[in-house]
Image (spheres, helix red, strand yellow):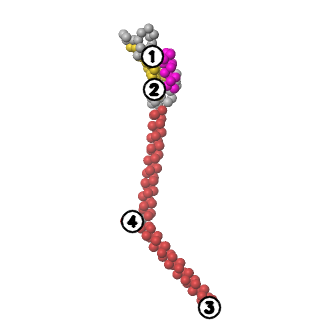
Amino acid sequence: MTITILLYILAGFVVLLLVWTVRFEIRLKRLLMGTKGKSLEEAINILGNHVEKIKDTQIKINDHLKLIDQKLGKTVRKVETIRFNPFEDHGSNQSFAIAFMNDENDGVIMSSLYARDRMSIFAKPIKNGKSEFELSAEEKEVLEKVK
């Protein structure tokens, strides 16, 4: 009799497992079917492809930003101007010295000497914050200000 009860219990347990398995199978099919007949696997594949495209685009953007950063370092980013009167006995502050420099302290200093009968303009290249040409006091001042 004990064996019969044990067999009934095992049969009931098998029926419970079978019902649970069928319900699980139905739920899984419903989940994988998705909307409009698309399966979950197909949706995951599509999303995976989109992620790969986004990664490729991100790599291109990062490379482009590095190139832009390199170019920006060489552009004129620091500008300073001073005006002065080179002739103490006459005239006004119509003369100027202006420095155009990049982040590496390369650039040019332009200066102008204004007199009533003429105007002279000079340009002196700057490399690493120094010029191979002699700088006037005003040019030295504008160079120090721009650094």
The answer, for residue 141, to whether it is visible in the render is yes
Q: Earlier in the sequence, mark 1 or mark 4?
A: 4
Q: Earlier in the sequence, mark 3 or mark 4?
A: 3
Distance (Cα) linking label 4 and label 2: 62 Å
The residue at the point 47 percent across, 26 percent down is: 101
The residue at the point 51 percent across, 19 percent down is: 140
Residue 13 counted in the magenta span: no
Residue 144 counted in the magenta span: yes
Amino acid on which disc 1 is placed:
Phe
Question: Which residue is labeled 2 in the image?
Answer: 79
Residue 1 got which mark? 3
Secondary structure type for disc 3: loop
Please rate how many residues cluster around mark 3, counting C-alpha atoms within 10 Å: few if below 14, some from 14 to 19, many from 20. few
Question: Which residue is labeled 4 in the image?
Answer: 35
Amino acid on which disc 2 is placed:
Val
The mark closer to the camera, 1 or 4, is 1
